[in-house]
Image (cartoon, rainbow, N blue to C red):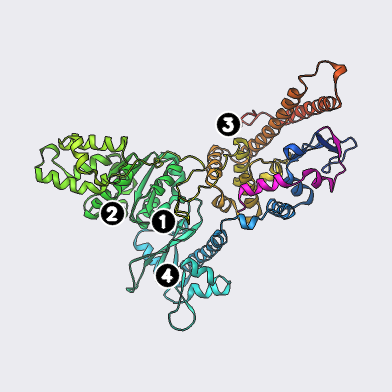
Amino acid sequence: MIPEHKIQEVLERVDLVGLVSRYVELKKAGREFKGRCPFHQEKTPSFYVVPEKHFYFCHGCRASGDAVSFVQRYLGKTFIDAVRDLAREVGVDLEAAQDPGARERQQLKEVTDQAAEHFRALLWEEEGRRARAYLASRGISDETARAFGLGWAPAAWTSLADRLTKVGMMEWGLNAGLVSKRQKGEGYFDFFRSRLIIPIRAPEGRPIAFGGRLVDAEDGPKYLNSRESRLYNKSETLFGMDQARDEIRRRKAAVLVEGYFDCIALHQEGVKHTVALCSTALTPGHLKVLGRAEARELFLLLDGDQAGLNAVERLAGPLLAAGAAAKVALLPQGDDPDTFIRREGSAGLERLLTEARPLTNHVFLTLLPQGRDASFEEKMAALERLKPVSAQLPVGLVRSAFFSALSAWCGLPAAELEASLRSKAPPPVNPVPKPGQQGRPGQPPARGVAAQGGPAPRPAPVKPPDALETLYVAAVLREPRLLVRDTFRVCDELAHPGLRLVLAHATSGHGAEDALFEAHDTVKRAVEAASRQLAEQQGSALEHYFLQVCRAIVLRRINQQLDYIKRTTSQTAGAHDLSDDTRRLLAQRIELLALKKRVEEEIRPPPPGTKAPMQPV
């Protein structure tokens, strides 16, 4: 992806008058330049270039935009190609501006896609019958297996390696950890062998890593997972989020389990707001992912044995530190979510969730069942087990509230409790976004340390895109055919570079999910929110809504131009004082009012049951 600030630098450096003059004869008109529009036939010039603001507009055909959109429109180039051509002209090095790891990231994406397709195809061929039998033994249907993109890695040592060699991706496969070099002799061998493959996907649905469950073999651990990479960070990834995201938003809650198959089984039984950890630790990154999906409540559904109880203690620290609204759903002794849901069904699980206890109540009750009546020795043992939890609580309200609750439970003074457990209390930090709470746009936590030893510089904040333009892009992502209905050519005039990049990628064969996968978080969140706003629109209703959005954007631009003319001409004393510039602006006003009337006449009342788009401002 081209950095947005570099696109802006290109637009600022380009001599727009010089660029347009190559194809249009322009004459100076005050602070602007005027000529006959190159996009429609006209005898009277109505096409203006405004160098101060780096844009052009035509009162006749409504065309407007910047240097990039002019090149797109006049020369028929794509957005990406137009930016690159102009960057070469004005000396902006786009390659140097990109993240040094961008190329590696793209290679990892392509080789992971290749591997996912390879594994998926093998599962449904003859050699995948053992894996299909294993799935059947666990009650996983073919439909569910296909929905989660499950696959099969055969026992052969070079099944995937041979495919990657054939398509020229062996080096990429090595970087992704999908294949390894032989220690003796030449050649490569597969990392996953004799394993049922579970793709780990980004929230947008694209595979970024794999988990492998050993089937009919005894050589190696039961589960094997991809190593971390520029594409996959397990501390920021939740398995099943791509399938669960919509249901989490609907319920404003998420169910957290620890195993891939626990998650898959719950989804199959209709508990579709379930996700699973890809590691043993719950991190602020995981809570941020849940927060983006608008989860306001988190249910911990862990195994009903000692290991499950220990897991609750392990997860309690980061949850309490974030102030998350978490509850614990207790499974019967010996059960795991997979076996419970198969026996009791979704109704049984919903009852379990209804009876879930708040996290602090569960922790206190588990560690000190008798509360105030517990013996001195029992209280000291419980406090010792609480040390890892309290050590994660930052100094402040959350920590104070925790010790107040603990004091009420065990009957010991809060100040004394905090003093006894204070040794590793972390300092106050910026609050971690909890489920249902967003972080501030453009301010992600620092990921490393600069070479000089100081904190790594934060990237420049990305301005949130305009709401109307975001609705436009979200509609096209959902239904690409709508682009041909854009008679106003809004696509060439989107103001936000991030939106233009998303649209360019989505309409160049990459698909909506791939386009959003690369987008900045600020743009991605805006487009996802707009997509939810469009959720109820289908078929002709969606098309009508899209046209209303297009017209609203055009009307807003016309109104902005009219306001500018009004402000500029408001100081005119009388008709005899009119300058050439003022006369020209007043003539433009007449043209704009006529255009506004034509646009408004095209707007028809929406069909019954549709919502009107946001009104122009």
Circle 4 residue? 192
- Residue 194: x and y in percent read 40, 71
Task: Give the amino acid at mark 1.
Answer: Lys
Task: Give the amino acid at mark 3.
Answer: Gly
- Residue 426: x and y in percent read 31, 44
Q: Nearer the viewer, residue 297 or 135?
A: 297
Task: Give the amino acid at mark 2.
Answer: Asp
Q: CA distance from mark 1 to mark 4?
A: 18 Å
Circle 2 residue? 336
Whether residue 413 appears in this view of the structure is yes
Q: Earlier in the sequence, mark 4 or mark 2?
A: 4
Of helix, strand and loop, which one carries label 3?
loop
Circle 1 residue? 234
- Residue 141: x and y in percent read 41, 58
Circle 3 residue? 609
| Residue 516 belongs to magenta span | no
Q: CA distance from mark 2 to mark 1?
A: 23 Å
Other residues around mark 4 within 10 Å, as few (<14) / some (14–19) / many (≥20): many
- Residue 492: x and y in percent read 71, 44
Q: CA distance from mark 2 to mark 3?
A: 45 Å
Task: Give the amino acid at mark 4.
Answer: Phe
